[in-house]
Image (tube, grey):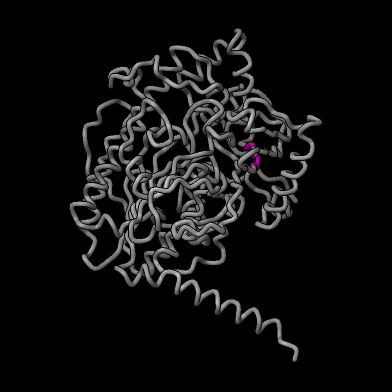
Amino acid sequence: MKINPNTIRLFSALVAITLFSLKWAETLLAGDRPNILFCISDDQSYEHTGANGDPIVQTPAFDRTAREGLRFTHAFCDAPTCGPSRSAILTGQHIWRLEEAGNIHSTLPAKFATYTELLGESGYSIGYTGKGWSPGRLAPGGRETNPAGKAYNQQRLAPPYTGIRSTDYAANFQAFLQDVPDDQPFCFWLGTSEPHRSFQAGSGKLTGKDPADTVVPPMFPDHEIVRNDLLDYLVEVESFDKMVARAIVTLEERGQLDNTIIVVTSDHGMPFPRAKASLYDAGSRVPLAIRWPQGIRNPGRTITAFVNLSDLAPTFLEAAGLMPPKMMTAKSLTGIFRDDTNQNRDVAFIAMERHDGCRKGGKGYPCRALRTKDYLYIYNFEPTRWPSGSPDPSVCARSIPYGEIDTSPTKTYMMENRNKDGVAHLAALAFGMRPAEELYDLSRDPHQMVNVAGSLEAAAPQALLRRQLFAHLKTTGDPRVVGGRVDWDYYPYYGKISTPGWSVDEKPED
């Protein structure tokens, strides 16, 4: 007897739904649906937590979350730029699937479902404090409120240093909880503006940190200016961690700690040259720790599997007993929670389009990357453009040279000394042009300083990784690969414009 293929597909779907339901039945029957506390810093690289090995920074909240839950050693943002990264987190999709949301200072179209909205529709109380989805304008995308939830920003404090926001994030979390009915689960986004620049110069020394102890990544000159800049950055990392610690205490006091999924991470890497707004590890590899005693088996594990932050959206939905919508292409972490060893997670994908409008006509620097244990492969679609922004500040919306890189003492020192021994090569890496393809052998070059693309030795892995990257881009519908509208260079720019007459080019007629 011949069986109708549609019958087979229907039967397979029913089996999948049944298994999904049974998978979480034990967890959901053991207690109420879990609460979610999502804590996200602004511009923090992977290595800058105590649990991840930094010898100076003090991050007891992150370290506790990792110790009592899971610590991920290969977690990557979907894009090393604020708005697109946060859009990917909320929607569970690659940025190349999100139209305008692939650019910073843009919008997040309402047609893209977010985990917060779906949780809210299922009975969760949703709120946020500090930096939720940002920066940009939501109205052009058809949204009336921030997709992170209802804003709680009324509670303030006197910050210890200039550059640290006066928002009392932890107190605002308490205010939110006071509004949540006792029988209702919640999902809260605690998003600090730290350690985004600017920093108070010398704050690191004021906290007792010694510049001599600073770990200077090899892509920066080892100079006192750089060392102190790094210390000032670590002060703001600690400020974020203190807010997370206070939020955890609040959950303990309310007896809600063990039934709350706590996630501690960052939207992308540190605000330094060759980090933020680049696809290298310093820009894309982020700290990630997750604690949930009622849902994580064998806590205390170190997870070496590769994950993207977009994987959090389907994770939260599945943990709440909901099926993620088909448009969410990210992969839930619930298998890792169950200690399932058949995860097949050996690669992460990262992307960039327009960051801060620092090329003539508002053009971006479109690029895609594939990161494995052994290699980082990057494909730059427009290698004739300046990757860090034009050296001419008059074509930059921010009116600064190399405007994709935030102004900082480290950047200024490298620019002013770019022709000197010990700095010239590093400045070229930070500010100079890049070829269409980049390949870094991480066993020999963990900081991605030597591009081996084009070498005879690297020909085989380069070809393999190129095929793997483009196959994934094709499968997930990247317009730069499959064709169709490619409008990122022409979408409106809603950021602050400091340069008179600056504008985005109009898209030419098809």
Q: Which residues are magenta?
A: 364-369
Q: Is residue 137 magenta?
A: no
Q: Is residue 366 magenta?
A: yes
Residue 142 visible here: no
How far across and how far down the image is residue 247, in percent?
Answer: 26, 46
Q: How many marks?
A: 0
How far across and how far down the image is residue 91, in percent?
Answer: 50, 56
Image point (41%, 62%), residue name: 117
User: Is 42 situated left or right of 279 in this image?
Assistant: left
Image point (75%, 91%), residue name: 1
Image point (60%, 81%), residue name: 11
User: Is 441 situated left or right of 414 in this image?
Assistant: right
Is residue 167 or residue 195 the one in the foreground? 195
How far across and how far down the image is residue 149, in percent?
Answer: 36, 56
Residue at the right extreme, as displayed? 456
User: Is 58 situated left or right of 329 in this image?
Assistant: left
Is residue 496 or residue 175 the one in the foreground? 175
Residue 455 visible here: yes
How far across and how far down the image is residue 217, in percent?
Answer: 51, 23
